[in-house]
Image (cartoon, rainbow, N blue to C red):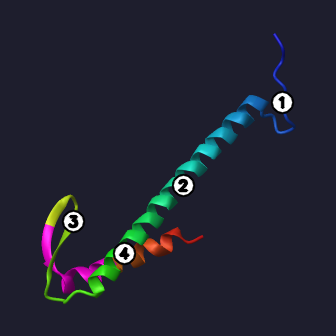
Amino acid sequence: MAAKKKTKGGIDHEQIIMQFNQMRQEIRSVMGKIGELELEVNEHSMVIDALKGVESERRCFRMIGGVLVERTVKDVLPALENNKEQVGPSITM
């Protein structure tokens, strides 16, 4: 059997490769989440822009926790803007 090569720190090359691959997977996961959040912000922006041209007493529907609820535009618009503001800063680097 061949002896495993160790670096100066005492870690063999296989462990380094495993750590590297694990870190690469974590980066992919984080980048995927950033993409999801960017998409969510864009969707919020489109809906906000669409609702700004609608009278405030008009009824609309919003999905909250898997439940579709009926509200008025004046109730939904501030909530959407607030959600967008909360998600938006978390994706800036």
- Nearer-N-terminus badge (3/4): 4
What amino acid type is highlighted by mark number 4?
Met
Q: Which of 20 and 31 is in front in this view?
A: 31
- Nearer-N-terminus badge (1/2): 1
- Nearer-N-terminus badge (1/4): 1
C-alpha span from label 3 to label 4: 18 Å
Q: Where residue 57 sits: x, y (%)? A: 13, 88
Q: Which of 34 and 14 is in front in this view?
A: 34
* Residue at the spot of label 2: 30
What amino acid type is highlighted by mark number 1?
Lys
Q: Which quadrant holds the C terminus?
A: bottom right
What residue is drawn where x is 87% and y is 37%?
8
C-alpha span from label 4 to label 2: 25 Å
C-alpha span from label 1 to label 4: 55 Å
What amino acid type is highlighted by mark number 3?
Ile
What residue is drawn where x is 45% and y is 59%?
36
What residue is drawn where x is 60% and y is 51%?
27
* Residue at the spot of label 1: 6
Image side of residue 62 versus residue 25, left or right: left
